[in-house]
């Protein structure tokens, strides 16, 4: 998620996972990710694992903080030139 959000290589700085419910055997689930914030080299992603047909059935919820290994600001400045 972070790499696709920034198009830069990232390292995981923090990962928090909260297991809300058991996933029934044979269930089909989907992972929903959203970009929560992007500040300098820091990228925060919130995510949840939900039932495929009912997004209110949340099995897992969490957030992650990634740090881009390249300087994002210098790349943005080069792109403007």
Image (cartoon, rainbow, N blue to C red):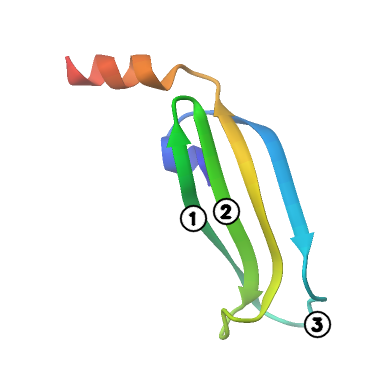
Q: Nearer the viewer, residue 40 or 53?
A: 40
Real-space Cα separation, disc 3 to disc 2, in angstroms: 23 Å
Residue pictured at 77% horizontal, 70% vertical? 20
In the image, is 38 to the left or to the right of 22? left
The residue labelled by disc 1 is 34
Real-space Cα separation, disc 3 to disc 1, in angstroms: 25 Å
Mark 2 is surrounded, within 10 Å at the Cα level, by few (under 14), some (14 to 19) or many (20 or more) other residues, namely: some
Mark 3 is surrounded, within 10 Å at the Cα level, by few (under 14), some (14 to 19) or many (20 or more) other residues, namely: few
Residue pictured at 45% horizontal, 31% vertical? 39
Quadrant into which the C terminus falls:
top left
Find residue 71 and report its horizontal and vertical position in percent.
Answer: 45, 16
Find residue 38 and report its horizontal and vertical position in percent.
Answer: 44, 37
| Mark 3 or 2, closer to the camera | 2
The answer to whether the residues at label 3 and label 1 have Cβ atoms under 8 Å apart is no
Residue pictured at 50% horizontal, 38% vertical? 3
Mark 3 and mark 2 lie on one chain; the one further toward the N terminus is 3
| Mark 3 or 1, closer to the camera | 1
**Element carrying mark 1:** strand
Residue pictured at 47% horizontal, 49% vertical? 35
The answer to whether the residues at label 2 and label 1 have Cβ atoms under 8 Å apart is yes
Find residue 41 and report its horizontal and vertical position in percent.
Answer: 49, 25
Numbered mark located on residue 46 in the image = 2
The quadrant holding residue 51 is bottom right
In the image, is 22 to the left or to the right of 14? right
Real-space Cα separation, disc 2 to disc 1, in angstroms: 5 Å
Mark 3 and mark 1 lie on one chain; the one further toward the N terminus is 3
């Amino acid at each position: 998620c972070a790499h696709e959000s920034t198009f830069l290589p990232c390292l995981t700085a923090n990962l928090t996972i909260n297991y809300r419910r058991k996933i029934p055997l044979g269930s089909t689930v989907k992972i929903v990710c959203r970009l929560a914030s992007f500040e300098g080299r820091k990228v925060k992603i919130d995510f949840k694992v939900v039932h495929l047909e009912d997004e209110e059935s949340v099995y897992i919820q969490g957030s992650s903080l990634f740090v881009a290994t390249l300087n994002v600001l210098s790349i943005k400045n080069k792109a403007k030139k």
